[in-house]
Image: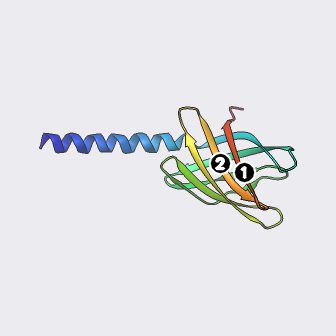
Amino acid sequence: MKRKTLLSVALAFVATVALAAIADLSGKWVGSVKDPDGNDHSIHLVFKVDGEKLTGTAQADGDPQNIEEGKVTGNDFSFKVTTHDGDAIPVYGKYVAEGDSVSLNFEQNGGKFHLTLKRDNN
């Protein structure tokens, strides 16, 4: 019986730590991505996490766009951004608490992109 209780407490602790870690995803993130021509584009993300729901904004060139259909599963997350031209871009990411970074993958106009963003403490 003690072993079962200990296991239950340990699992509850692990779940609490996992939820606390992904809650740290909330906040401002900044990085850049190179386009196929080699030009750098600044990327600014603002995330808000509520349980498994991810909301916020994404901004590259132009005005910020709302994050749509955002969800969080463990340290993985995904969302969609609709561009000014009406193109929907699915984005897949991973939050790395130890390095306080976010890595993202997305495809746009036939190109595949990967970038790492750091927390923006401003």
Q: Residue at x 79, y 67 (%)?
A: 86
At numbered mark 2, what does the secondary structure look like: helix, strand or loop? strand
Expressed as whole percent of the image width and height from the top left, the position of residue 31 reads: 73, 39
Quadrant holding the N terminus: top left
> Residue 96 vs residue 45: left or right?
left
Quadrant holding the C terminus: top right
**Do the residues bearing badges 2 and 1 touch, measured as CB atoms within 8 Å?**
yes
Relative vertical location of residue 47 with respect to residue 68 in this rendering, above or below: above
* Amino acid carrying mark 2 in the image: Leu
Location of mark 1 (residue): 113
At numbered mark 1, what does the secondary structure look like: helix, strand or loop? strand
Expressed as whole percent of the image width and height from the top left, the position of residue 77 reads: 56, 52
> Residue 61 vs residue 81: left or right?
right
Disc sitting over residue 57 in the figure: none
Disc 2/disc 1 C-alpha distance (Å): 8 Å
Bin the neighbour count of mark 1 within 10 Å (Cα to Cα): few under 14, some 14-19, many 20 and up.
Answer: some
Q: Residue at x 19, y 43 (%)?
A: 5
Residue 8, picture quadrant: top left
Location of mark 2 (residue): 104
* Amino acid carrying mark 1 in the image: Phe
Expressed as whole percent of the image width and height from the top left, the position of residue 44 reads: 74, 44
Instruction: Give the total of numbered labels.
Output: 2
Relative vertical location of residue 42 with respect to residue 73 in this rendering, above or below: above
* Snapshot colouring: rainbow
> Residue 52 vs residue 40: left or right?
left
Q: Residue at x 69, y 55 (%)?
A: 106
